[in-house]
Image (tube, grey):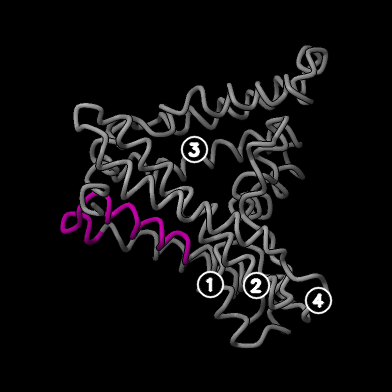
Amino acid sequence: MNTTTHKTCAMILLVCLTALPFGVREQLPAWVFMWVLAFALFAGCKVLTLVEAGPALATMNRNRALGYLLLWPGMDPKPFGQPALDFPAPARKAWFHALFRTFHGAALIWVVVPRIGEEHWVARAMVGMLGVILLLHFGLFRLLALGWQTRRIAVKPLMDNPTRATSLTEFWGWRWNSGFHDLMHRYLFRPAAKRFGVRAAMMLVFLASGLIHELVITVPAGGGYGLPTLYFLLQGLGVEFERSTLGRSWRLGHGFKGWCFVLLVTAGPIALLFPPPFLRNVILPMLETLN
């Protein structure tokens, strides 16, 4: 089969894997269904990126391919198809920071959350979600990145100090979840930019991001539909405003003003991204199970 056929098969596999969890939805708690659905979507995307890797796939041995599929959350297989590079091993400080965030996330989930009263259920859910994000994205995933870098495979951490971003372009472009950005840039932004232009392509990416988050947030929760999509459309509008004549005159993409604007736009409407039905029906039952 040629590359196009392989890619088509991978796309079909992605759709099938994403659809499979719906067959057992009624038998699963909402939070388990969310994780199964997210993992199915993730697995389908991993296979798609591996199939599309082309020359990188041809030079990738079986162990490297399995490492990319099973032990790396990013969506760029190229480093796994390249020869081991000669660059300095990660510093001890990087390992310490990753371990600290791992334990910090675990402490929020298993120490802080149980001490928050059930009457403060929103705070309980938000603290628990923060713990999960720290534990996985900033902790365990960073440790995986350091492990691969130790083996001279030049992977980039998914999170690149997002709290230092001084523009929304910087935050969403490469500091927050580079794996998702790589996926959207490769399969949506570049093709759409060629056909509709950069601005329309950017808004399509934010729209698609919203719809994907609907799939793993509001669908398992059974409520709050449309709010995650609205959140991401607001992010796109924020980027547009940041790049506008007025935004540039206010220097919203630079320095302290830019940092404040990023905080306002990303954290201000966070209740849209994580609506009450998601907190109540998915996150709280998950935390109760974990504790």
Task: Tell me the CA gap for discs 4 and 2.
Answer: 11 Å
Label 3 vs label 2, nearer the camera: 2
Contact between marks 2 and 1 (CB within 8 A): the answer is yes
Is 78 positioned to the left or the right of 118 in the image?
Answer: right
Which residue is nearer to you in this view: 70 or 216?
70
Q: Which mark is residue 148?
A: 2
Task: Tell me the CA gap for discs 4 and 1.
Answer: 19 Å
Give the class, few, some or many, for how many residues have Cα within 10 Å of label 2's Cα (few <14, many ≥20). many
Which residue is labeled 3 in the image?
210
Task: Tell me the CA gap for discs 4 and 3.
Answer: 37 Å
SS assignment at label 2: helix
SS assignment at label 1: loop
Q: Earlier in the sequence, mark 3 or mark 1?
A: 1
Picture layout, residue 204 above or below residue 157: above
Task: Tell me the CA gap for discs 3 and 2.
Answer: 31 Å
Task: Tell me the CA gap for discs 2 and 1.
Answer: 9 Å
Q: Which residues are magenta?
A: 23-43
Q: Position of residue 238 (x, y in %)?
A: 64, 23
SS assignment at label 4: loop
The stretch drawn in magenta includes residue 155: no
Which residue is labeled 1 in the image?
71
Is 147 positioned to the left or the right of 32 in the image?
Answer: right
